[in-house]
Image (cartoon, rainbow, N blue to C red):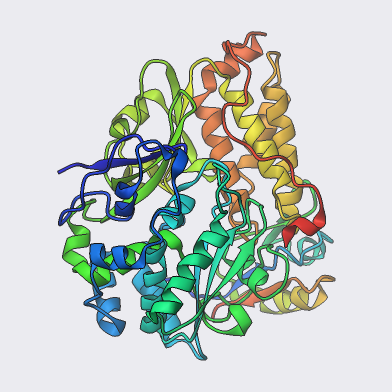
């Protein structure tokens, strides 16, 4: 069975490298040397639900989403 | 039983293929046997619909029964990703909405010509596959997507060849679904599934990163079955001969045969059909004049001479070695050329072929190409090497399509296989005696508009 648990996903064609996600969610997002996110490929921990929601809304490029089931 | 059969040598026939038997190869390019030995006078081979039906007969398995046979056959996509075809067929058939079928013949890699060879010699097998797949998923709309291209010997280009084949079928009334031909721009990524959908929808042939998959929402927002043209040709033969016949060549886990474009150390390329699991050394001469073999093309990986001599054409063999079977591109790199310079030349072209949409790709690939260009010079380049090691570990899974993933696979294997040459360069020497490029690369794209 594929792992369908909720994960943070980025639309790579929409992402413009603002880096807001790494600021708001350092637990899950790091930036590469060009400022683009490297996102941990792990199910979202329950304790971060609020932070994740806020990061998705605050992305200036609206490039983030939560995929999978929560 | 013969495991391979040579069909075409850079536009010329090498030898007549064996006549098709129950399991004999070639299966897909049997019609090439009608061609002359010297191809200078080749006139529209494979166009004769009557000869095609006489050779292959009529399909026995259709609709749901065909999906069952395809499942039992274990057919996987021959465009490079090897995705199970029956799963795609079932997903599209079950999806909400009226499905669309697309035959994808847009092989963007300059080192590949197997799809063009297939469409040239066996267009009706591919078009049979389109109709059978459309029936199986319940589609009323179909496309065939190919590069405009040109005919090597000044004859008609592929699109007009296919239009002639389609006209024959219309006259004979064989097809339930009419097939529209859409031309792909001459870009490496134009055949990527989401780029193809965007192009057919009237946009640029650039990949997209969407929440939904093409089989759910593709052409016109409808569930879309995109299959490589070779995959559809295999499907058309499974519809005639069944799963057991298909599995009578190949390995248990990777059944059947596949088309390959093999470039020998003398630079000559030929298209051939091989059973999966055939040793690479049967498909190409791996003499001491060869320093490495590239398997899977420019999104594949380099194999050392020792590895290439031991391994077979299958993902089971090639993946653990860092390469892939992919779309069957095999290239023998002669010892006379510098492996690092060749890798740098291809990496530059891959960087230029980025669609420029995803940060990791449009930043990372040019940086990787520039570092490789430094490494290709016979002088110390420690920083470039350290950067390459870091960047190749940082790209996978970070693009809308697999262009960055495939490119770093190609580059990372070069750093391993050409390690001795890296040491030579660091000491100020290069072992090459000829300057390249040996590996074919396309001219850099010119303008924005060439994405359409």
Residue sitting at x 37%, y 68%: B85
Question: Residue B206's quadrant in the figure?
Answer: bottom right
Position of residue A29 relative to residue B150, above or below, is: below
Question: Residue B282's quadrant in the figure?
Answer: top left
Residue sitting at x 62%, y 26%: B437
- Where is residue A24? Give x, y as percent: 78, 67
Which quadrant does the N terminus of chain B fall into? Answer: top left
Question: Viewer-proximal residue, B244 or B419?
Answer: B244
Which quadrant does the C terminus of chain B fall into? Answer: bottom right
Residue A41 visible in the current orientation: no
Question: Residue B265's quadrant in the figure?
Answer: top left
Indicate left or right for B423 with A17 as reference: left
Indicate left or right for B220 with A36 as reference: left
Indicate left or right for B203 with B407 as reference: right
Residue sitting at x 27%, y 77%: B66
Question: Viewer-proximal residue, B245 or B319?
Answer: B245
- Where is residue B59? Give x, y as percent: 25, 75
Residue B337 visible in the current orientation: yes
- Where is residue B124? Give x, y as percent: 39, 65
Question: Viewer-proximal residue, B148 or B422?
Answer: B148
Residue sitting at x 50%, y 45%: B112
Q: What count of labels does the image hold? A: 0
- Where is residue B300? Give x, y as percent: 49, 43
Position of residue B95 relative to residue A49, above or below, is: below
Question: Viewer-proximal residue, B133 or B31?
Answer: B31
């Amino acid at each position: 069975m594929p792992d369908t648990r909720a994960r943070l996903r980025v639309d790579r064609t929409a992402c413009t490298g603002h880096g807001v996600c790494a600021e708001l969610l350092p637990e899950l997002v790091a930036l590469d040397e060009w400022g683009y996110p490297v996102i941990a490929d792990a199910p979202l921990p329950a304790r971060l639900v609020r932070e994740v929601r806020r990061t998705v809304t605050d992305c200036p490029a609206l490039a983030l989403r939560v995929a999978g089931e929560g | 039983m013969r495991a391979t059969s040579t069909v075409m040598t850079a536009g010329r026939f090498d030898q007549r293929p064996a006549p098709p038997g129950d399991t004999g190869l070639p299966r897909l390019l049997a019609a090439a046997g009608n061609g002359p030995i010297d191809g200078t006078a080749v006139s529209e081979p494979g166009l004769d619909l009557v000869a095609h039906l006489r050779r292959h007969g009529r399909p026995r398995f259709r609709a749901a029964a065909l999906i069952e046979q395809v499942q039992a056959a274990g057919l996987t996509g021959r465009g490079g990703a090897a995705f199970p075809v029956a799963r795609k067929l079932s997903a599209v058939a079950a999806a909400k909405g009226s499905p669309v079928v697309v035959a994808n013949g847009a092989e963007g890699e300059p080192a590949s010509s197997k799809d063009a060879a297939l469409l040239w010699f066996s267009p009706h097998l591919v078009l049979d596959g389109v109709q059978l797949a459309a029936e199986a998923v319940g589609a009323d709309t179909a496309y065939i997507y190919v590069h405009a291209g040109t005919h090597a010997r000044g004859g008609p280009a592929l699109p007009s060849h296919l239009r002639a084949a389609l006209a024959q079928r219309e006259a004979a009334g064989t097809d339930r679904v009419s097939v529209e031909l859409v031309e792909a721009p001459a870009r490496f990524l134009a055949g990527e599934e989401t780029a193809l959908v965007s192009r057919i929808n009237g946009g640029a042939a650039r990949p997209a990163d969407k929440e939904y998959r093409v089989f759910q929402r593709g052409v016109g927002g409808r569930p879309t079955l995109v299959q490589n043209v070779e995959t559809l040709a295999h499907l058309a033969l499974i519809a005639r001969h069944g799963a057991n016949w298909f599995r009578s060549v190949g390995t248990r886990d990777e059944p059947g045969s596949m088309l390959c474009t093999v470039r020998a150390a003398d630079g000559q390329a030929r298209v051939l059909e091989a059973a999966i699991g055939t040793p690479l050394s049967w498909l190409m001469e791996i003499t001491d004049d060869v320093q490495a073999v590239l398997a899977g093309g420019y999104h594949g990986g380099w194999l050392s001479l020792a590895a290439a001599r031991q391994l077979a054409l299958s993902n089971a063999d090639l993946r653990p070695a860092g390469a892939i079977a992919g779309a069957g591109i095999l290239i023998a790199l002669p010892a006379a050329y510098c492996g690092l310079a060749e890798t740098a030349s291809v990496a530059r072209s891959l960087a230029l072929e980025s669609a420029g949409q995803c940060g990791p790709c449009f930043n990372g690939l040019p940086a990787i190409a520039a570092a490789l260009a430094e490494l290709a010079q016979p002088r110390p380049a420690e920083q470039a090497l350290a950067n390459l090691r870091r960047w190749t570990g940082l790209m996978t899974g970070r693009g809308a399509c697999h262009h960055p993933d495939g490119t770093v696979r190609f580059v990372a294997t070069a750093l391993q296989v050409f390690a001795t040459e890296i040491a030579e360069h660091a000491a100020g020497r290069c072992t090459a005696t000829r300057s390249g490029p040996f590996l074919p690369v396309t001219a850099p794209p010119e303008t924005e508009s060439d994405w359409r």
